[in-house]
Image (spheres, rainbow, N blue to C red):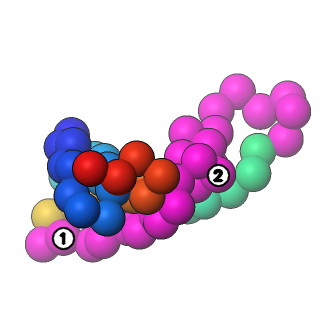
Amino acid sequence: MRLTREREGLWIEVRDSGPGCPVLRQPGCEAEGGRGLWLVGLLADELEVREEVVGKTVRAGFKSLRA
């Protein structure tokens, strides 16, 4: 995990080496998981997923938290 404060706002990056990309979904009320990325997507001003040579990085930007 990495936090970066830039002129445009605050960025949070989470990287893992697992295969595949996360899927943004809206789970049902009875679902026991699958809300993390959905919640971050609702709160963030920008959300991107980058595939890396090994794994992927999810990056969320919060512009209302300007430096």
**Badge 1 amino acid:** Glu
Which amino acid is tagged 2? Leu
Q: Position of residue 61 (x, y in %)?
A: 40, 58
Q: Which mark identifies residue 1?
A: none
Instruction: Locate residue 56, reporting x and y percent.
Output: 27, 62
Residue in view at x 76 percent, y 44 percent: 27
Dot 2 crowding, Cα within 10 Å, few <14, some 14–19, many 20+: few
Stretch of the chain drawn in magenta: 28-53
Q: Quick check: 23 left or right of 29? A: left
The outermost residue toward the front is 67
Secondary structure at badge 2 equals helix
| Residue pointed to by mark 1 | 52
Q: Circles 1 and 2: CB distance less than 8 Å?
A: no
Residue 42 — which label?
Answer: 2
Disc 1 secondary structure class? loop
Using residue 11 as the reference point, say whether residue 54 is left or right of it.
Answer: left
Q: Nearer the viewer, residue 48 or 67?
A: 67
The one nearer the camera, 1 or 8, is: 8
Residue in the image at 64% along x and 33% along y: 33
Q: Is residue 55 above or below residue 14?
A: below
